[in-house]
Image: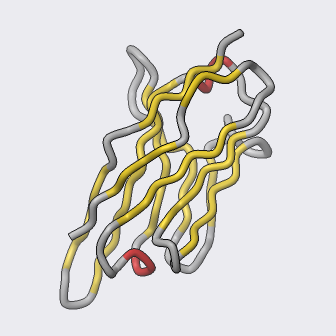
Amino acid sequence: QVQLVESGGGLVQPGGSLRLSCAASGSIFSRLAMAWYRQAPGKERELVAAVTSAGRTNYADSVKGRFTISRDNAKKTVYLQMNSLKPEDTAVYLCNAAGIVPDVGLVTAWGQGTLVTVSS
């Protein structure tokens, strides 16, 4: 139903910025809530930021004021702008799509992840 492909990860110095992208396939993107999660080595996966189909956003306390999630329904893409990066932001970042779509049912999908490394 939906396939997700992340891009934009890489190595960045503390204080730097990166923008992650998650491109979706299919025709129901605009109906889905989108989110970014991250998982650091030895830690549980955690929600970083989310945006509903209506455009409402929420953030983990650890990234508020530094990260911004946005979506472009015409491009079927969700973004995560990450500023003032810290070493503790180092993780694999994963894109998630979820929703209940009329005539389709429950939809949930994960991307393969993109690695973000914050280090000097």
Q: Count the numbered circles shown.
A: 0
Q: Residue furthest top?
A: 120
* Residue 99 appears left or right of 71: left
**The quadrant where residue 88 appears:** top right
What residue is rendered at 43% in x and 47% in y?
A: 6
What residue is rendered at 76% in x and 41% in y?
A: 66
Q: What is the x, y in percent for residue 69?
A: 63, 56
Q: Residue furthest bottom?
A: 103
What residue is rendered at 70% in x and 45% in y?
A: 67
* Residue 31 appears left or right of 107: right
Q: What is the x, y in percent for residue 78?
A: 53, 61
Residue 30 drawn above or below residue 83: below
Coloured how? secondary structure
Q: What is the x, y in percent for residue 51?
A: 55, 64
Residue 74 drawn above or below residue 48: below
Residue 13 drawn above or below residue 73: above
* Residue 91 appears left or right of 103: right
Q: What is the x, y in percent for residue 5?
A: 37, 51
**Looking at the image, which is closer to me, 61 or 119?**
119
Quarter of the image with the C terminus is: top right
**Looking at the image, which is closer to me, 111 or 41?**
111
Residue 55 drawn above or below residue 95: below
Quarter of the image with the N terminus is: bottom left
* Residue 116 appears left or right of 41: right
